[in-house]
């Protein structure tokens, strides 16, 4: 046990966890798998904020790169809208398990989601609802990693958990380099200096500035989210100093 049992967590879910490896779009089997893990954590008494990614549908920078006519900001807004599609799918999947949720969007969209208002999000958390945040930060040119760092700070979370398809942060891409070493514990400066691309550097810098612990873990392994939410070390922990 390397950190205290958190009372409130932010879980950053990348869009890629919503579809089978090397696929795109939304597979409800993948969504249901995540939803059941999230519901168990919430029903165990931990307050859960999910910050939804959208990369399974569209990432602004990549979409712009393939299309000369689209403005980059438009592409980023499209990416933000993609996170709302994912958020809607996750909301129904979690509620089908009897766990109340609220979907909040940083881009006003009143007929499908509540507007994101910090005090309202806190109110929902105190009532045991899982708060799903879509629309990123509401501004282009950043990613949902930055949105996750921002929400973790403003909603006073104890830790930011980043769910990935690998076991944590490695010295190199473990899918391409058999020699890649998995780190158990890193400092924010290690991640920034070594340019370990597991989260965007803006998000790590924000966490560093305010001492928000980050843990990167494998969401595909059953039970790891529950263990991480219980304060166990299940991947790579990033803090100001090595534990
Ligand atoms: N995005 C944005 N502002 C934000 C969050 C996201 O412009 O605050 C856009 C950006 O283009 C990004 C896309 O939405 O690529 C989808 O988010 P992200 O790439 O973070 O999704 P993930 O990789 O986590 O699935």
Image (cartoon, grey):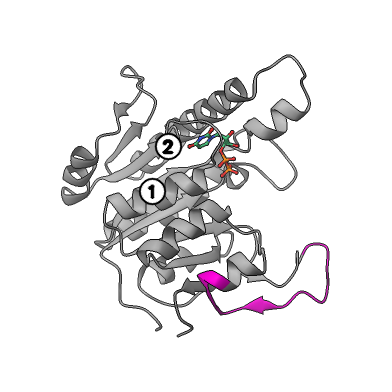
Determine if residue 168 is in view.
no
Q: Residue at x 63, y 68 (%)?
A: 193
Q: Residue at x 63, y 45 (%)?
A: 16
In this rendering, the answer to whether 62 lies above or below 200 is above
The CB of the residue at mark 2 lies under 8 Å from ligand 1: yes
Residue 46 versus residue 65: which sits nearer the camera? 65
| Neighbour tally class for label 1: few under 14, some 14-19, many 20 plus, Cα within 10 Å | some
Per the image, the residue denoted by label 1 is 150
Q: Residue at x 47, y 33 (%)?
A: 89
Q: Residue at x 64, y 42 (%)?
A: 19
- Mark 1: secondary structure: helix
In the image, is residue 179 part of the stretch drawn in magenta? yes
CB contact under 8 Å: marks 2 and 1: yes
For marks 2 and 1, give the CA distance: 8 Å
The label number, if any, that marks residue 170 in the structure image: none
Image quadrant where residue 232 sits? bottom left
Q: Looking at the image, tell me whether mark 2 or mark 1 is earlier in sequence order.
A: 2
Q: Residue 103 appears at what percent x and percent y? A: 34, 34
- Mark 2: secondary structure: loop
Q: Residue 167 appears at what percent x and percent y? A: 62, 68
Q: Residue 13 appears at what percent x and percent y? A: 51, 49
Query: Left or right of 54: which side holds 175?
Result: right
| Neighbour tally class for label 2: few under 14, some 14-19, many 20 plus, Cα within 10 Å | many
Image quadrant where residue 225 sits? bottom left
Determine if residue 102 is in view.
yes
Quadrant of ligand 1 in image: top right
In the image, is residue 35 part of the stretch drawn in magenta? no
Q: Residue 88 appears at what percent x and percent y? A: 43, 31
In this rendering, the answer to whether 231 lies above or below 33 is below
The span shown in magenta is: 175-189
The label number, if any, that marks residue 137 in the structure image: 2
In this rendering, the answer to whether 28 lies above or below 122 is above
């Amino acid at each position: 046990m390397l950190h205290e049992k958190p009372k409130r967590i932010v879980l950053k879910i990348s869009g890629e966890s919503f579809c089978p490896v090397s696929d795109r779009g939304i597979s409800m089997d993948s969504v249901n798998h995540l939803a059941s893990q999230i519901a168990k954590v919430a029903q165990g008494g931990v307050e859960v904020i999910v910050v939804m990614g959208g990369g399974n549908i569209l990432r602004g920078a990549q979409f712009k790169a393939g299309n000369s006519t689209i403005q980059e900001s438009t592409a980023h807004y499209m990416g933000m809208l993609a996170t709302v599609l994912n958020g809607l799918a996750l909301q129904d999947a979690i509620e089908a398990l009897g766990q109340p949720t609220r979907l909040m969007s940083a881009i006003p969209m009143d007929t499908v989601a509540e507007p994101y208002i910090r005090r309202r999000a806190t109110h929902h958390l105190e009532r045991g609802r899982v708060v799903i945040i879509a629309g990123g930060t509401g501004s282009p040119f950043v990613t949902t990693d930055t949105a996750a760092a921002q929400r973790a700070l403003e909603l006073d979370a104890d830790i930011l958990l980043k769910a990935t398809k690998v076991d944590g942060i490695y010295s190199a891409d473990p899918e391409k380099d058999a020699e890649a070493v998995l780190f158990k514990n890193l400092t924010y400066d290690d991640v920034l200096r070594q340019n370990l691309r597991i989260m965007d550097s803006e998000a790590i810098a924000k966490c560093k500035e305010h001492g928000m612990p980050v843990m990167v873990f494998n969401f595909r392994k059953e039970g790891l989210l529950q263990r991480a939410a219980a304060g166990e070390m299940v991947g790579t922990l990033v803090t100001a100093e090595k534990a």
